[in-house]
Amino acid sequence: MFYVYVLRSERGEHYIGYSADLKTRVASHNRNQNRSTRGQIWSLIYYEAYSTDKAARDRERILKHDGRTRRALMERLLRHHE
């Protein structure tokens, strides 16, 4: 399986990523092994599973670069986590 995920920091910031090993990837974010997420503690708040690498990468690209799609997901997540 391949995953697209959303992390939330203690400060309320969000990060969208992709991985074939979700558990290990989240742990690496919290061990400061990723430049873009260093210095914060991250919690997994959402993920989607895909059967192909291409499908997951395409979805990650859409969420990172299509403002309307990203905004819709983030609004849904914020309503769920309030």
Image (cartoon, helix red, strand yellow):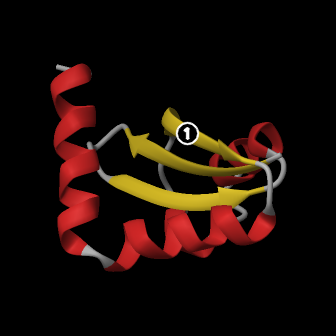
Residue 61 pos. (x, y %): 49, 76
SS assignment at label 1: strand
- Tell me where residue 62 sits by quadrant: bottom left
Measuring 16% from the left and 19% from the top, which residue is drawn there?
82
36 sits left or right of 71 in the view: right
Query: Which residue position is annotated with label 1?
Result: 47
Q: Nearer the viewer, residue 75 or 43?
A: 75
Residue 29: percent from left, percent from top: 65, 53
Q: Residue at x 35, y 80 (%)?
A: 65
Question: Going by the image, does 43 lie left or right of 28?
Answer: left
Q: Position of residue 37 (x, y in %)?
A: 52, 62
- x, y (%) of residue 44? 53, 34
Answer with the quarter of the image where residue 33 lies.
Answer: bottom right
Which amino acid type is shown beneath numbered disc 1? Tyr
At label 1, counting other C-alpha atoms closer than 10 Å, the crowd grade (few under 14, some 14-19, many 20 or more) is some
Residue 56 against residue 66 in the figure, above or below: above
Is 78 or 61 nearer to us in this picture?
61
